[in-house]
Image: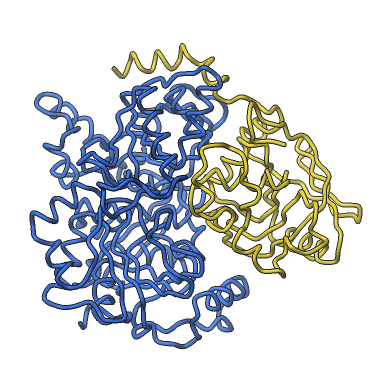
Amino acid sequence: MKTLFDRVWDAHVVRELADNVALLYVDLHLVHEVTSPQAFAGLKRENRTVRRPELTLATVDHNVPTGDRSLPITDEIAARQVDALGSNAREFGIELFDLRSPDQGIVHIIGPELGATQPGMVIVCGDSHTSTHGAFGAFALGIGTSEVEHVLATQCIVLKKPRNLEARISGSLEPGVGAKDLILALIGKIGTAGATGHVIEYTGDAVRALSMEERMTVCNMSIEAGARAGMIAPDEVTFDYLEGRPRAPAGAAWTAALARWQTFRSDPTARYDAHVSLDAGNVGPQVTWGTTPGMVADITARVPDPAQLGENEREAATRALEYMGLKPGTPLAGIPIDRVFLGSCTNARIEDLRTAANVVRGRHVSSRVRAMVVPGSQRVKAQAEREGLDRVFRDAGFEWRNAGCSMCLGMNADVLGAGERCAATSNRNFEGRQGRGGRTHLMSPAMAAAAAIEGRLVDVRGW
Amino acid sequence: MCADGDGMTPFVRHRGKVVALPRRDVDTDQIIPKQFLKGVERTGFGEGLFFDWRADPNFELNRPEARGATILVTGPNFGCGSSREHAVWALAQYGFRAIIAPSFADIFLSNCYRNGVLPVQLPAAEVDTLIQRAAGGSYELAVDLEECVVSDDRGFSAHFSPDPYGRELLLRGLDEIGRTLLEEPSIAAYERSHA
C-alpha cells in the first residue's frame, strides 16, 4: 500500500545510498538568475558539464524590472546576474526564456503553463516555491545552490526520504473564499513549522473541486508550513489542463503518458505518518496580521492580544505587532493600506487576474492607494490583454506591469517604503520582505482587489 | 574560512564563543536580505548577515560580548522561508561554525551540511539553558560531531542526533558531486531503463 509520494519517490531511486537516503533522478530542473551563478561557476572551476541540458529550463524572474522592456536594466548588479544566466545558458546549451521571450515569466508559472511540469516527475529548482509544481502530482522541491550545481552535474539529487502528511480538506468553499484562504487557514492551524520534514499530500473533496491553478496556489505555500513539498494526485482536471500545452506529450505519446500518470495516486488504505484535516466550509477570507504566514486570522477577527497567546508565541507576536504598527484588539477589517500588490508565483495566473478584475470592474482604486498588477508570465499578460483585463485594471487606476517576481521579494525597483502597508497576494510577510520597514498583509486576489478600491482591508464577501 | 571556494572545511569538533538570539522562526530574509543576493560569487556575504537587525545597536550580535562568537544559539524553526544558500554563506563568512536550535527548516539544514556549518538540534529546554548561560556574559561551548555532544565547562552536556548523511558530509568535508559522479554506472542504467 503506497501513497502518491511513495510512488513518485520509488520511480526515481537510482540507488539507495544509506538507510532512507537515496540518489534520486531529476526529470526537470528549473533555473533562474539569482541562485544559479555560483553553481555554474563551480562547474567551470571543476571542468564539469551539465549532464542533461535538455531537462533543464532557465528563465529570468527574481530581479528583473517589470516596467518598459525596451529599456536596459538600470540596476547594474542585477543586469550582471541576468547577463551571467544568459552566458551560462549559452555555454552549457540550456534553453533560456529571457526578457525578450514571449514565454518569460516566474519560473513556477511558466513550467506548468508550457506543459513542462507533468505528473509523477521529480522537479527541482533553487527556489523554495518549487512546491507549486506538486499540484500536478510531481514531487517538486526547492534546493540550495550547492544542490543546483549537483543536479546540473549529475541530474540527480541526494535526499533523505521525508515523511508523509495527509492534509484532508473536506466540504465546500463559500463564495468569495478561495484556494489562498484554504492554504492560509491550514498554515494558521498547523504553524509555519507544522509540516517540517514532511511532504504534504492534499486530499479530500474540497481539493478535488479546485481548478488546476487553484491547486497550484495551495501547493505553492506548502513551504510556508515548513513542508519539503506539497502534492495533489493528478485527475481529469490535471489532464485537461495539460492537453495541448507546448511541452506536453501529443498523439500516441499523450495516450501512453496518460496511462502512466493515472497510476500516480495513493492507495485507499495507504498509511501516512501524520494527518491534519480542515473543513473548507468553515474557512472565511484570511488575512495575515504579523510577520510569518502562520500569523493569520479570518477577516472578521481582531488583531490578537499577545498577552492572551501561549507562552511560546507571545514574544514573537509582540515583536510582530510592533513591526506591523498594529494594536491588539483592532478589527482587521478597516485597517488602512497604502499599496496593493497583485502578483507572485502564488497568485498571478490568469484565473487570479480574472477574479481580481471582476472585483474592480467599473470601480476606482482609492486615492490613498498605489496598486499594481504584475502578471506571473508574459503569456498570462498576453492572455489577460486578449480578454481586456488590462483595460479593467488600468481604468480602475492599477499599474499594469510586465512579468516577474517583483514586489513579492522586492529584488527589483518594486519595493515598499518604510512604514508602508501593503495588501499582497504573495506568500511571505516577513519583516522587510517587500522593502525595509514595509508591512505586508497576505490575502487572496479578490481580497487584495477589494482592499485597493476601499483603501482598507475589507471582507470581500459582503462587499 | 569555508564555503568560499574549492572544497569544504570539514567539521569534527569546535570550541567557541556563544551568542544567543532568542527568537523563533528566524527566516532567511532576515539572515541575508534580498539586496545581498545579486552577487555572482560565493564570497562577501558576511557583511550582510542580519543586516536590518544589525542597524539596531541593541541587537544581540552588536553587543560587545558577542564579538568573535562562532556558535549561535537560537529559537525553533531557524532558517525558514527562502531556499537562499546565501544565508548559510553569510553565517559562515561572518564566523559561525555551529548553530544550536530546537528545530531548523529543511532546506536550510541541507544547505548547512554542504557548507561546513553544523546545525545542532537540541530539546527546547536545553536550548533555553544555553540561552540563559550565554546571557550571563562571555560563554563558550564545545561541539563534538564525532561524539555528537555539546558541552560547557559548567557541567552542561547534551547528546544530539544529527542526520547521518549530513554528519558524514561535515566530518569528511566531502565533494558531494565528485562522489555522485562515481555512481555513473547506476545513473546511466537508470537513464537507459527510463528512456
Quarter in which the C terminus of chain A is drawn: bottom left
**Residue A435 location, x and y as percent?**
46, 64
Left or right of residue B85: residue B6: right
Residue A399 can be seen in this image: yes
Q: Is residue A145 above or below residue A305?
A: above
Q: Tell me where residue A180 sits by quadrant.
A: bottom left
From the top left corner, tell me how far across and down residue A134 is, in percent: 33, 44
Image-based side of B150 in relation to A158, left or right: right
Residue A406: quadrant of the picture: bottom left
Find residue A408 and report its image quarter: bottom left
Relative height, residue A188 to residue B123 (above, below): below
Total marks in image: 0
Of the chain colours in the picture, the one used for chain B is yellow
User: Quick one: which residue is furthest to the top in this view?
Assistant: B185
On the image, the x and y values in percent for residue A187 come to: 42, 63
In the foreground, A252 or B29: B29
Residue under the point 46% across and 11% down? B185
Res. A135 visible in picture: no
Q: Quadrant of the N terminus of chain A?
A: top left
Provide residue B105's location: percent of width, then percent of height: 55, 51
Residue that appears at 36% across and 32% down: A86
Q: Nearer the viewer, residue B54 or A166?
A: B54
Residue under the point 18% across and 78% down: A364
Is A193 in front, or is B34?
Answer: B34
Q: Does A440 appear above or below B171?
A: below
Give the colour scheme of this rendering: by chain
Which color has been applied to chain A in this rendered view? blue
